[in-house]
Image: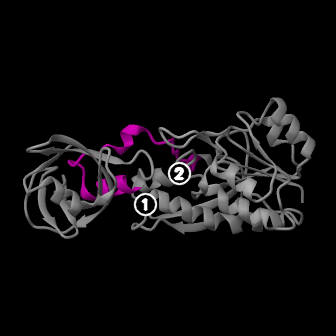
Amino acid sequence: MRTVFLGTPEIALPTLRAMAHSAEYRPLAVFTQPPARRSRRGAAESSPVGAEAQQLGLPVHEVEKVSGGEALERLIELQPEVIVVVAFGQILKKAVLELPRHGCLNFHPSMLPKYRGAAPVQRAVLEGVVDSGLTIMRLVRKLDAGPILLQRPWRLEPAKNAEELLAEAGELGAPMMLEVLGRLEAGITPVEQDDSQASFAPPLEKSDGELHFADSAAGILNRIRAVQPWPKAESRLQTEDRGELRVLIHRAESADIAVPGTSGEVLAIDKRGIVVACGEGAVRLTELQLEGKPRKPARDVANGLRLKPGARFRS
């Protein structure tokens, strides 16, 4: 089958590899977003998909817009029977959607029509969802509203953050895509989505990482999980000798402690981390990062700052 692959970030890599190693579905070409800076001081680098495709010996096209110009001309020349899309990062227009006879197939890590949009896993974690799903659908012009070709239930393990769950979703999605590709010639009965049941998952914003300790402990833990790897959870720690410090919180857990305290107050410091009072319950911060410093166990940060109970995190 003549296939073309469109994708950009890490979540797309398992499907790209699975197709590349398949005699039946090895892509004729890979289209991805243009090179970008991956760090503040670094030079522009190819996307994860672009770099992996080169390693796999596949022709790579790094394009700002696949639905027009030379990129579209090249795509038409390839005459794909199906286009596979995994987190490409561009809206596909009619000229691309209608080009392959089997259409454009997309992997989406939610149980559609729930969480249509760019951040389905992050938004689901933020809302405390545990039972979710994975979907292969055919793309249409309306956002994530195309007919469903295959769905599987998927548990968002509470011990995993969004970054870890996205990696897991990518691994689980690859065999699903190969299964759908294998059934295309025989025919798959698509299932139309019920738009009345749709919910939306817009991209995260920088402000989504701000912690408010007046929230419940459960809500704070979900937020810390949801905003990894970006924008990361952050708060301000008030110290006696160093003033107010910006702190990134990478990991935390629920803390069962009977000591009363006001929201944001450090209740205890133990070998597992820093226990902080919330509007309801308490959390134990276990991995922190001070601005300009490496990630460390929270206990080490507390020792370095000579932190004591009674210190306060400010929302």
Q: Quadrant of the C terminus?
A: top left
Q: Is residue 237 positioned above or below 72 on the image?
A: below
Is 203 included in the stretch rendered in magenta? yes
Is residue 224 found left or right of 120 in the rendered image? left
Relative placement, left or right, of 248 versus 262 is right
9 with respect to 102 (left or right)? left
The amino acid type, in three-letter code, at marker 1 is Asn
- The first of marks 1 and 2 along the sequence is 2
Residue 187's quadrant in the figure? bottom right
Q: Residue at x 42, y 53 (%)?
A: 226
Q: What residue sits 73% from the left and 43% below the top?
A: 140
Question: What colour scheme was applied to this rendering of the protein?
Answer: one colour
Mark sitting on residue 161? 1
**The residue stretch that appears in magenta:** 196-225
Front label number (1 vs 2)? 1
Question: Which residue is under mark 2?
Answer: 120
- Can you give x and y, in whole percent of width and height, for residue 230 in the image? 44, 47
Q: Residue at x 53, y 44 (%)?
A: 200
State whether residue 59 appears in this view: yes
The kind of secondary structure element at disc 2 is helix
Q: What's the CA distance linking mark 1 and mark 2?
A: 13 Å
Q: Quadrant of the N terminus?
A: bottom right
